[in-house]
Image (cartoon, helix red, strand yellow):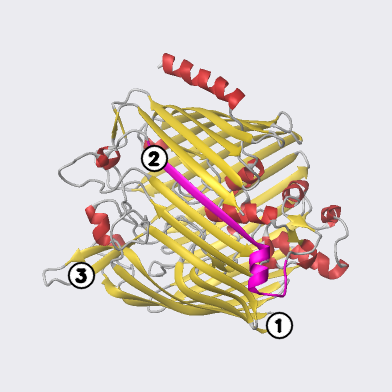
Amino acid sequence: MSIRLILLLLAFHFVSFTAFAQDDSFIKDILESAAENLSEDIDLYELTERLNYIRSHQINLNATSAKNLKQLIFLSPLQITNLLRHLEVNGKLLDLAELQSIDGFDLVTIERLLQFVTLGKNGTTDKLSLKDMWRNGSNDLILRYGRVIEVPKGFTDLPGSRYLGSQDRILLRYKYASNNRIAAGLVMEKDAGEHFSKGKVLSDHFSANLTINQVGPFKKIIFGDYSLQFGQGLTLWSGFGFGKGPDVTSVAARDVGLRSYSSANEASFFRGVSNIVALWKGIELTSFISYRRRDGSVKLWPDSTTTIQTINDSGYHRTKTELKNQNSLGQLVFGGALQYLSDNLNLGLVSYQSTYDQNFITGSSAYNKYAFTGKNLLNTGFHYNYTFKNIYSYGEVAYSVNGGWAIINGLLASLSPKFSVVLLHRNYDRDYSNFFSNAVGENTDVRNEKGTYAGLNFTPSKRFVYSVYFDYFKFPWLKFRVDSASKGYELLAQGVYIPKKTLKILFRLKREVKQQNPDASDKTQELRNVLKGSVRLAIDWRLNKSIDLQQRIEISIYKKGNVTQEVGKLIYSDFNYHLPSSKVSGNLRIAYFDTPSYNSRIYAYEDDVLYGSSFGAYADKGFKCYSNIRYRVTQQIDLWARYAVIVYQGKESISSGLDEIKGIKKSDVKVQLRFQF
């Protein structure tokens, strides 16, 4: 492998002089700090696009609302409330420098905020005519193509199960907007292994919507695909959401209500009509109705009837089995959310009915004893948040009719300009059922969990930022691979040193302990503690206006029971180049990783073509190198290209099953065209 290492190092030096970085390092920093705990296959488009759009259509701080400011995920709810209260008491801001006088606004937050806000006028109009739509409208079209260069086993001529489509990945995104009054979106996607077949609209996944704002009593109307986010995510939350992270305030959800849906994720959205009506001052009603076909795991019974065990959210339709399950379940959802919204007090009541055209039968596994069964599910909940001086309290109570309860309550307090704390308690019954929940917790769904979370942020000076949180949790009922009640905890401590604007040094410790059934080779019957830990040292260094360097060293630890612990390593360097006057920019990473197994894998954020960012899992032993290049053809047209290659040591094949690739190398290519007009 020494020859390959030399070749990769030579490639690094070569591309360092010829490839250049995207100018999105600022948004990258926000994404990495906010979305680190998300799964590796999450589509970050929803968040990335939102931040990019706001950066080019800045929020007027003198004419804004809490709902608009919640889109800036790095602002805590308390910071948002303090800003609005400052405007109410002191009047409009005359200069953005006044932000330093608002409680809770440290220099790091202000530096981030300046990228997205202004004190000028909003680009809105009271008119809604075809002439204005044509003259003031903006169009954004993205075409993307990608594929793995090697041929996985599933694409060969197998006698049994195999992928029925091509290796090509294809994506089309289109967005139209005019003066914040009207907008339209379209997403078409084909995953690798899927094919274009009769009855499909040009692609395997098709999503579209039309949004109209400020029409008579309606604040917003959406036709097509949309997402709904209310409260703390217990009762109704679809689409993108956060949980625990280095920013301890992320456990307080920033709900944005009704939004058009623009992600390529094929599961977490509604399809139909939704609107927001202003009833009285501060009181609004969001109503919605949705019907769509979902993928479900179908079971055929001897009498030829069928039932559903689970809803499949992967969105893959590549094999005969996946195609059989495609659109096998009809889902009708209708309901509403009544809210009172003010600067310091928000109250909300949400209720909706979900109806399915087949029965849910969850199987005979003991851990599924309290899972949802039947065809109809009624969910209702109440959420609140209230700010008193420098204390922000929030929470939600949710109930699934004929099922259980879910409760969450939290407190965010700014004890001084340098010190803030977060306390949170949650209690989710084992029989609480909800297909549209996304709240703080350890489970993939909101049920069977009790937990207490405490976190603090400490900023003693503009050069030092410290964060720490501790979360203790219990699972009163059984779980998958856990045959009795269990418990665990998670601890994170992080320090950031910023000696100057061009240099940032980060050090982080994380430790998580859960319980799990013993392995087959373990003769004991007791649950075993599973330890996952990590240590990270990261250095971000801006050499000048054109060149950024990032280096990271991370060590992972995995240990189950009395088995010898695994220790994994990841070392990488990023080189980013962007010259404002140049048409070419890009970035490059070279990484070395060594983990004994997938259990000790290490996740790291990876740059990609625009809106294609992801979190890669580094496991086994080898090297990974990728490079992104952007070429600005004209002011309206941009072209991206990405090449990534991963080379493993001591392996005869990569992956398993239908994804198995013979050899030690896996490479991926991607190109993207963006046309703005």
Horizontal side, residue 278 vs residue 40: left or right: right
The magenta stretch is 124-148
Mark 3 and mark 2: Cα distance apart in space? 36 Å
Q: Say whether marks 1 and 2 touch (CB < 8 Å).
A: no
> Considering the numbered disc 1 on the image, is that residue within a helix, a strand or a loop?
loop
Q: Say whether marks 3 and 2 touch (CB < 8 Å).
A: no
Residue at the spot 19% in from the left edge and 40% down from the top edge: 157
- Compare residues 29 and 139 and report the one nearer the observer: 139
Residue receiving disc 2: 147
Horizontal side, residue 415 vs residue 437: left or right: right
One can see residue 525 in this view = yes
- Compare residues 346 and 551 and report the one nearer the observer: 551
Is residue 275 shown in magenta?
A: no
Q: Please tell me which of labels 1 and 3 falls first in the chain.
A: 1
Residue receiving disc 3: 306
Residue 92: percent from left, percent from top: 85, 65
